[in-house]
């Protein structure tokens, strides 16, 4: 009989102990994914993947090594553990390596409250194909849409198990369902494209295929015949669908691994205002039906709600155990790992304080400037926070949309930009990063 992911992690720990490891932790992921792509009314691609992947991290004193495999045979697990221990003995010592103390481990979590897995049956391939066909048809029904570059529907399910020689054992199941569409308007060099999509844990929460196709088409048509504004300094309104990227740069700079390396423009900023007073950035890993929720991190520590930014003030870093030890701090239970990689800190669900005005009301207040709806490329100096990105969207004149814009570059400094943001009230509450449209004063636009 095939072993469960939890049984496989225990088998790996036993193999590591027999191979001579002083301590070890293991991860097992059993997953299924199904993806359907439709183009020109015809099934273009159908993919289904099923598999099990295992990862083992061993400690020999303060030396550590990680290995992975998809072979679950007993002899393969033994060879895997022996190889990991041999590798660890050849690596330099890491004074910060080590598992959590048993007193730190998560206990008695409530998986049902998180609603990470939809009990609804896996959709049939024909159902996903119908999703994609309906999204494509809805987009093509719009006059001016010349083609649909892609229309897709996917389903995934994972069983994740973690175990460690300090006594931790835990696991959970995740599911996901998505629909997406990329529509193209115009012809030749005048072609423009845009997209829409939705991804949820519960299939019943997913927006309709028709809604996604219609929105993708509308967005593509709105981008036809773009212009470039004059170069200068203008207010910029980051639309809700891309505003989280701006907060993402803040999150990256507060990552403990970057801070420990000295490669962060926020180093030395603990206790300082990095956002306007009144704004907080809250991490809540226990939000139901949200893709980044989890009861414990990859090192078995209990996750918890915390404020990365409290009333504009930076309160701490995002830390796993090793980086917390380097910085002489406590882990924030933000350790993440893949099967093949080591541990690194990452954030879970984030929510930025919303404002009391709509995007349109902020647009009216900005007068003349740029509404950004999509971005390409990125040049961010991790040490200084200097920011430069290509952008497209709408030119705003006298508070109203005037004409579509593309081919402009935004430039500024993240430390200065984030201190003057004004949030709208339009964030989608089901996303893992709940960030509304953000108005930033005085960015430099490189246009004509």
Image (cartoon, rainbow, N blue to C red):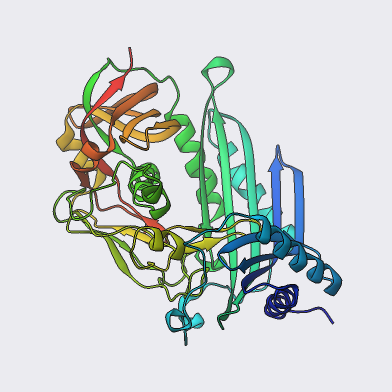
- The answer to whether residue 225 is left or right of residue 11 is left
Please state, as top left, top right, bottom left or bottom right, where the C terminus lies in the image.
top left
Residue 394, quarter of picture: top left
Picture mark count? 0
Residue 79 falls left or right of residue 154: right
Percent coordinates x, y for residue 151 in the rendering = 63, 44
User: Which residue sits at x=36%, y=59%?
Assistant: 350
Q: Is residue 250 left or right of residue 202?
A: left
> In the visual, does 31 lie left or right of 282?
right
Residue 141 screen position, x and y as percent: 57, 38
Residue found 51% across the figure and 40% down from its top: 195
Identify the image quadrant of the N terminus: bottom right
Q: Position of residue 154 (x, y in %)?
A: 65, 55
Query: Along the line of sight, which residue is nearer the eye, 159 or 118?
Result: 159
Residue 307, compared with residue 192, is above or below; it is: below
**Height in image: 170 above or below 345?**
below
Q: Is residue 229 above or below residue 178?
A: above
* Residue 147 visible in the snapshot: yes
Q: Residue furthest bottom?
A: 108
- Residue 127 visible in the shown view: no
In depth, the one of 232 and 250 nearer the eye is: 250
Camera-side residue of 351 and 3: 3
| Foreground residue among 74 and 398 | 74
Question: Residue 65, image x and y in percent?
Answer: 64, 60
């Amino acid at each position: 009989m095939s072993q469960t992911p939890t049984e496989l992690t225990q088998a790996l720990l036993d193999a590591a102990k027999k191979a001579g490891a002083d301590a070890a932790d293991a991860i097992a992921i059993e997953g299924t994914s199904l993806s359907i792509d439709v183009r020109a009314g015809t099934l273009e691609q159908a993919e289904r993947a099923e598999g099990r992947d295992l990862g083992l991290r061993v400690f020999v004193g303060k030396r550590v090594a990680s290995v992975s495999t998809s072979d679950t045979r007993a002899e393969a697990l033994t060879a895997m553990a022996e190889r990991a221990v041999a590798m660890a003995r050849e690596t330099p010592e890491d004074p910060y390596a080590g598992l959590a103390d048993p007193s730190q481990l998560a206990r008695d979590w409530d998986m049902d409250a998180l609603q990470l897995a939809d009990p609804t049956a896996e959709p049939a391939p024909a159902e996903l194909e119908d999703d994609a066909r309906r999204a494509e048809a809805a987009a093509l029904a719009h006059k001016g849409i010349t083609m649909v570059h892609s229309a897709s529907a996917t389903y995934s399910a994972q069983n994740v198990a973690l175990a460690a020689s300090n006594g931790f054992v835990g696991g959970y199941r995740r599911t996901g369902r998505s629909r997406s569409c990329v529509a193209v308007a115009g012809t030749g060099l005048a072609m423009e494209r845009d997209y829409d999509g939705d991804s949820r844990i519960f299939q019943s929460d997913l927006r309709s295929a028709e809604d996604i196709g219609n929105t993708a088409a509308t967005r593509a048509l709105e981008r036809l015949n773009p212009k470039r504004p004059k170069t200068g300094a203008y207010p910029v309104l980051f639309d809700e669908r891309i505003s989280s990227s701006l907060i993402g740069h803040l999150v990256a700079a507060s990552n403990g691994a970057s801070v420990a390396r000295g490669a962060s423009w926020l180093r030395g900023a603990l206790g300082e205002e990095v956002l306007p007073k009144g704004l907080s950035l809250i991490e809540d890993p226990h939000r139901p039906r949200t893709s980044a929720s989890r009861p414990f991190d990859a090192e078995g520590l209990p996750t918890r709600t915390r404020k990365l930014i409290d009333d504009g003030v930076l309160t701490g870093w995002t830390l796993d155990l090793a980086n917390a030890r380097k910085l002489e701090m406590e882990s924030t239970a933000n350790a993440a790992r893949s099967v093949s990689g080591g541990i690194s800190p990452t954030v879970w669900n984030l929510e930025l304080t919303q404002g009391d005005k709509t995007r349109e009301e902020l647009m009216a207040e900005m007068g003349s400037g740029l509404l950004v709806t999509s971005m390409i490329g990125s040049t961010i100096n991790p040490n200084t926070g200097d920011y430069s990105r290509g952008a497209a969207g709408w030119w705003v004149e006298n508070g109203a949309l005037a004409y579509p814009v593309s081919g402009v570059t935004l430039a500024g400094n993240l430390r200065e930009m984030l201190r003057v943001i004004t949030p709208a009230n339009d964030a989608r509450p089901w996303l893992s990063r709940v960030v509304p449209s953000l108005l930033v004063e005085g960015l430099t636009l490189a246009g004509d």
